């Protein structure tokens, strides 16, 4: 499997003429600094000059026609810089800081880091802050370290937060635990900017000791919050944890309450969660410096067809926000929040991480520069990325005990209830007092009543532990579907009619070392390998997006009426979301 | 001398009933955090509740009538908190974050830290960031460490910057050098927030290597700027150093140019430098988050009679700024700039460092709370400070070689020029082609032409080095005045008619281990000891203010027409300010 995928990836990664990107240090060694000084003073040449564009000033809100002189990866000067040298004609265009995503889970793109970079850098992204809690659930600090190693090679500033809630709860069995020790260790990395989203609102409200240790480890650093629908006294109690931000507001009232209680508001536009339209009125003159945009979770399809932060800025402008103010929110406000020095503005001494836009209103990115180098133009990367595959060990994380039909047996005591899923909701409902269908003494699926067997198979440590029960809402009439994307512990979840198809599906995922699969009548009819931690592909973004689409269609061909059966499946084992779940430990209800 | 001064100080430091202030840790230990949680949830009591006041919200600009519940030194909740307990009636009053001075030199108050605290805490100050470059010039890292040791005991958050420019130039001989090694060492302290004001604009424009090392040591931290009248290409060149702020703008145009180039603008209102009236129009809706207030240098008289940041807010409001916006600039903007977590706002989880104001427009501080304790009320401290004298070694830093009249001899080659001082200016002028007065082969003073002898005596290492020359503008008719406050190296400077009075004055300063003195006809007519590093008193602020006043009057009784002869004397050896100076190394002109 790795052989094949690497072979395909190579096709995209090689080109004849493009240079391989190499990151600079941008230090204050005499040589570097003096080069910048000489260019700033106009006593020597700049490396590159962006000539004649309108420069967006996030500090004053002005547009100013000026040349931007770049030397040693940073902006040397802005204004009348016209020494002969490498000129880029920007007449009629706009020069802005490249865009910043202050809260994202890179794993949600379903691709390995370089592919994510190829997707977003041509969209004008210059920095992201990722909470790697998916890979942390699978592979702990080592998994995060693997992402960190690759991040340092990319033409994109990638900051990390230390995951604060792995595992999500005691009702899930992840591959690794991220305790206070791991958090403290990760906070020593220069790339780690703070503590990741504090999702455990209940723990925060009860003074959970390990959480207190994690909060203390992050003293003096940012602590990201995550408090959906938390308001009033509960919010104030939650804030005793010292968190600084929230990206989970869905109503204007909720967001305003959080802002006035001191939280930086990250207005989220993900693939499924879309809060911009509701929250945009929050960003008025007085409060605008306390708002920024984030994507949180954007899948391949959204990244390809809509874009990244560029698309959020575009939507904000379409919604009535002044373009320069929208750009400030997406650049300086995010950089300032994260205390990222020297990015987020077009100003002397700042890293030359810039976008050249054809139009300010349309936010169409003509060119992206990183550390003064052109790294993308007209939608395509203009540099090759260094070879940065995931480490081998991270592509074999599925560790499954032998399974039989007996393993998938539903305990009759749990057979009178069902998890009920709904279109486009990660919140589920609980059905009670069902009459299970019993055949030969076993609880089995009853497709006529849309009561299907749902199993969650522990897959990290070959414990053989399986949770099984009824689910309603998938609507499959035959076959089975399965996935190793199962937030947050990422065990294998499968839904199907009979045990033989379920076993085939689970086994197929194990053989792919993770992925998505659809099975009909004992045969795999569609499969997408996700061998990196069982949650990411090593293939190009477009290949993965097509693969996901085929899988969804396959599930629909088996009878499902959901628009995204795999999207629903991915959250069915997330034990911290009400009201009913099945994890490897069994049926969980609230 | 120490015996006497301590005795007098004791009178002020003892009272019968007041508790001695003790600082808390405000940590995330289970106990502390759970106390806050219980109070926030209203399942247990708060330590203190500020009841019925109008709460100033710096995030939204609103005023809201609410109770503020405090537990474990932090704000637990804001709103309907009414469990029985320690109530403070705030009806008709306003509750705001305590004020923050983001750039100050504490030494300029002329008093040791606890006395400064006693002066400003009743004025509502809750945090300051001090650049200790005066004590660093005298006593290096050890001197700074002595201030740090005391700072940790005070009911005031005192942050430090690591001095970047000690010595100010090679033409001065300070007691200690603060090189890249000292800067790096100091940056490891939790109290050190960044690199202190980068005054060496010329060095920054030439890529000076030790400066590059200091800048690199501060990577990821704040770097304060100091660039008076620096604009255009010179400013852009200076910004290659990565500085983040400036407090030296004197015109609106200059400040606006710095703001648009990315600098945080600290609008300064010191004792002599007053920029608020000119710069206030800078703080509009869009740019306001990039402006704050600072005092830089405030002497005893100003602190006593005008106040501290409270007086700047008051002036800003009188100048037309909205009171809540003025308070935001003086609190949140400063805290956010310095990345001080959990201060600068009235919000849950924040340290309960608060002021209760009688009136929002008048900014009269009724009460100051630090970590939830009332520490001052109606202009007086309500807690005693822990005993925190300077270390003994820091009160004997004068180390003078034996001097004779011969030591003070003016080299005839330097006798054709004079330093010319002017009222209220630290910039001096240079007089040339003078005819010196020669008596018995020696160059001597000529009071009829206002040509007096000025000497600067190296006093740190007993080198016996003396710079001597003519000065014009003091107008003394007889006697001599001398001071060991002589920016930045703080050697002993003296001006007088004849050598015998000059020697008496210098000797008197040596005996006091620093201070100010006036001598007439061989006798000391006024003296103020400043034994702490030779630049600060160990006496109460009012005693020092009176002492300075007496000295100025004594100098005037000797004939000086300057309104502050000692104020002028203090800067006469500062070798980096044009156009003429006398340091221990001799006559310096530009």
Image: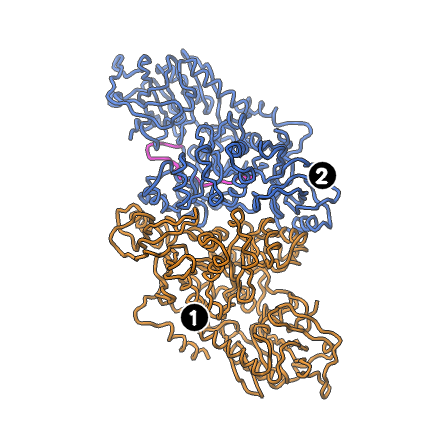
Chain colours: A blue, B orange
The one nearer the camera, B327 or B203, is B327
First to last magenta residue range: A157-174
Relative side of B575 to B36, left or right? right
Q: Is residue B432 visible?
A: yes
Chain ID at mark 2: A
Q: Nearer the viewer, mark 2 or mark 1?
A: 2
In the displayed structure, would residue A378 be above or below residue B172?
Answer: above
Chain ID at mark 1: B
* Residue on which the image places disc 1: B389
* Residue on which the image places disc 2: A87
Q: Is residue A113 visible?
A: no
Label 2 sits on a secondary structure element that is strand
The one nearer the camera, A193 or A324, is A324
Residue at image position (51%, 66%) is B298
Relative side of A241 to A365, left or right? left
User: Residue B581: x, y in percent?
Assistant: 66, 71
User: Residue B257: x, y in percent?
Assistant: 61, 51
Question: Outermost residue, top direction?
Answer: A521
User: Residue A417: x, y in percent?
Assistant: 27, 22
Which image quarter holds the C terminus of chain B? bottom right
Label 1 sits on a secondary structure element that is loop
Residue at image position (68%, 36%) is A91
The quadrant in which residue A378 appears is top right
All told, the count of numbered labels is: 2
The one nearer the camera, A137 or A259, is A259
Asked if the stretch drawn in magenta spans residue A162, the answer is: yes
User: Residue B93: x, y in percent?
Assistant: 35, 57
How many C-alpha atoms fall within 10 Å of the one at disc 2: few (<14), some, or many (≥20)? some
Asked if the stretch drawn in magenta spans residue A217, the answer is: no
């Amino acid at each position: 499997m790795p052989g094949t995928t690497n072979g395909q990836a190579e096709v995209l990664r090689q080109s004849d003429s493009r240079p391989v990107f190499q990151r600079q240090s941008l230090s204050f060694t005499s040589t570097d600094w003096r080069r910048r000084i000489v260019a700033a003073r106009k006593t020597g040449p700049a490396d590159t000059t962006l000539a004649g564009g309108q420069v967006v000033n996030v500090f004053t809100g002005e547009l100013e026609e000026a040349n931007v002189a770049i030397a040693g990866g940073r902006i040397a000067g802005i204004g009348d810089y016209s020494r002969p040298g490498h000129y880029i004609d920007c007449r009629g265009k706009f020069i802005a800081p490249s865009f910043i995503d202050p809260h994202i889970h890179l794993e949600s793109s379903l691709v390995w880091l370089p592919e994510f970079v190829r997707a977003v850098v041509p969209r004008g992204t210059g920095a992201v802050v990722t909470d790697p809690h998916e890979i942390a659930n699978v592979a702990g600090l080592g998994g995060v370290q693997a992402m960190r190693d690759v991040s340092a090679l990319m033409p994109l500033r990638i900051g990390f937060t230390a995951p604060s809630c792995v595992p999500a709860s005691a009702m899930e069995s992840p591959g690794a635990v991220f305790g206070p020790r791991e958090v403290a260790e990760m906070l020593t990395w220069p790339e780690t900017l703070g503590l990741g989203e504090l999702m455990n609102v209940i723990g925060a409200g009860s003074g959970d000791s390990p959480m207190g240790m994690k909060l203390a480890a992050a003293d003096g650093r940012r602590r990201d919050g995550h408090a959906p629908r938390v308001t009033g006294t509960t919010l104030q109690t939650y804030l005793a944890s010292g968190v600084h931000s929230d990206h989970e507001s869905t109503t204007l009232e909720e967001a305003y309450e959080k802002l006035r209680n001191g939280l930086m508001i990250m207005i989220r536009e993900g693939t499924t969660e879309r809060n911009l339209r509701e929250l945009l009125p929050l960003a008025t003159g007085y409060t605008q410096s306390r708002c920024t945009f984030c994507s949180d979770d954007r899948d391949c399809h959204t990244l390809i067809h809509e874009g990244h932060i560029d698309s959020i800025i575009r939507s904000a402008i379409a919604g009535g926000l002044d373009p320069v103010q929208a750009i400030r929110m997406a650049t300086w406000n995010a950089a300032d929040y994260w205390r990222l020095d020297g990015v987020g503005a077009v100003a002397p001494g700042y890293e030359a991480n810039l976008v050249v836009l054809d139009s300010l209103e349309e936010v169409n990115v003509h060119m992206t520069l990183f550390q003064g180098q052109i790294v993308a133009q007209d939608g395509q990367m203009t540099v090759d990325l260094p070879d940065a595959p995931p480490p081998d060990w991270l592509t074999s994380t599925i560790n499954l005990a032998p399974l039989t039909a007996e393993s998938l047996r539903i305990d009759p005591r749990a057979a009178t209830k069902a998890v009920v899923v709904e279109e486009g909701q990660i919140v589920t409902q609980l059905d009670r007092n069902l009459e299970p269908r019993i055949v030969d003494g076993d609880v089995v699926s009853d497709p006529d009543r849309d009561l299907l067997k749902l199993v969650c198979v522990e897959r990290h440590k070959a414990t053989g532990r399986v949770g099984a029960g009824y689910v309603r809402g998938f609507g499959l009439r035959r076959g089975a579907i399965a996935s190793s994307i199962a937030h947050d512990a990422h065990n294998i979840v499968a839904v199907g009619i009979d045990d033989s198809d379920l076993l085939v599906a689970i086994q197929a995922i194990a053989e792919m070392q993770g992925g998505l699969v659809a099975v009909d009548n004992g045969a795999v009819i569609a499969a997408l390998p996700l061998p990196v931690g069982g949650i990411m592909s090593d293939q190009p973004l477009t290949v993965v997006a097509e693969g996901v689409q085929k899988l969804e269609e396959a599930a629909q061909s088996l009878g499902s009426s959901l628009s995204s059966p795999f999207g629903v499946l991915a959250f069915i084992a997330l034990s911290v979301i009400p009201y009913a779940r099945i994890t490897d430990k069994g049926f969980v209800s609230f």
